[in-house]
């Protein structure tokens, strides 16, 4: 099976479902129980997704054998830096290389936006995500924000 990754508007049906699945997983893991539909809706409301479109960013959707399977967002925070967000691979597609492909596509998108550094923050419980970032050349850096869910900070020079 093959992967493809391409920019896509954050509000297409496939992108919206991927964003919803992402939020469901991270919220459920954080709370230690399944998130309710209402909690997911609340989390997605006013989440800044509109910045994930040129010129302020990009939203990417990965497809595995044409099925929407992964996503990531990129937000330009200054002329040299973009922030990686919403990195997600649906559970059925994990272990197939999709995470690395999403990071590589985000890095290409960042370069096309003129960015030379990508940074991100993540949580303690997202162990797999931290391993993915490290595997692909991201290094832990000092905190650059005070986000309520930020417990680890990473960056990569492009």
Image (tube, rainbow, N blue to C red):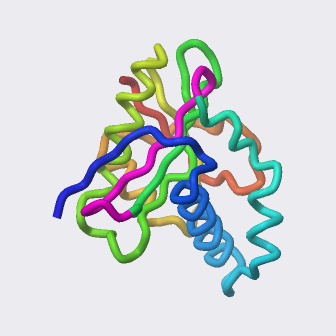
Residue 39 quadrant: bottom right
Q: Residue at x 46, y 43 (%)?
A: 60
* Whether residue 115 is situated above or below residue 17 in the rendered picture: above
Front residue of 30 and 96: 96
* Whether residue 4 is situated above or below residue 33 in the rendered picture: above
Q: Residue at x 60, y 25 (%)?
A: 76
Figure label count: 0
Main structural element of the magenta stretch: helix, strand or loop? strand
* Figure quadrant of the N terminus: bottom left
* Whether residue 97 is situated above or below residue 28 in the rendered picture: above
**Where is residue 20 drawn, in percent x and y?**
63, 65
Check residue 4 for magenta coloring: no
Furthest residue toward front? 13
Furthest residue toward bottom? 33
Residue 158 quadrant: top left
Check residue 57 for magenta coloring: yes
Q: Which residues lie in the magenta part?
A: 54-67
Furthest residue toward left? 1
Residue 124 quadrant: bottom right
């Amino acid at each position: 099976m093959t992967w493809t990754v391409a920019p896509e508007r954050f509000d297409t049906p496939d992108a919206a479902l991927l964003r919803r699945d992402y939020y469901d997983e991270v919220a459920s893991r954080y709370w230690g129980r399944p998130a309710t539909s209402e909690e997911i809706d609340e989390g997605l409301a006013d989440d800044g997704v509109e910045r994930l479109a040129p010129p302020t960013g990009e939203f990417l959707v990965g497809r595995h054998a044409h099925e929407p399977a992964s996503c990531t967002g990129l937000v330009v925070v200054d002329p040299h830096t973009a922030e990686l967000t919403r990195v997600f691979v649906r559970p059925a597609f994990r272990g197939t290389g999709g995470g690395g492909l999403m990071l590589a596509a985000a890095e290409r998108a960042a370069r096309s936006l003129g960015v030379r550094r990508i940074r991100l923050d993540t949580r303690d419980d997202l162990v797999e995500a931290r391993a993915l970032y490290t595997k692909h050349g991201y290094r832990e850096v000092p905190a650059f924000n005070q986000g309520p869910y930020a417990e680890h900070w990473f960056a990569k020079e492009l």
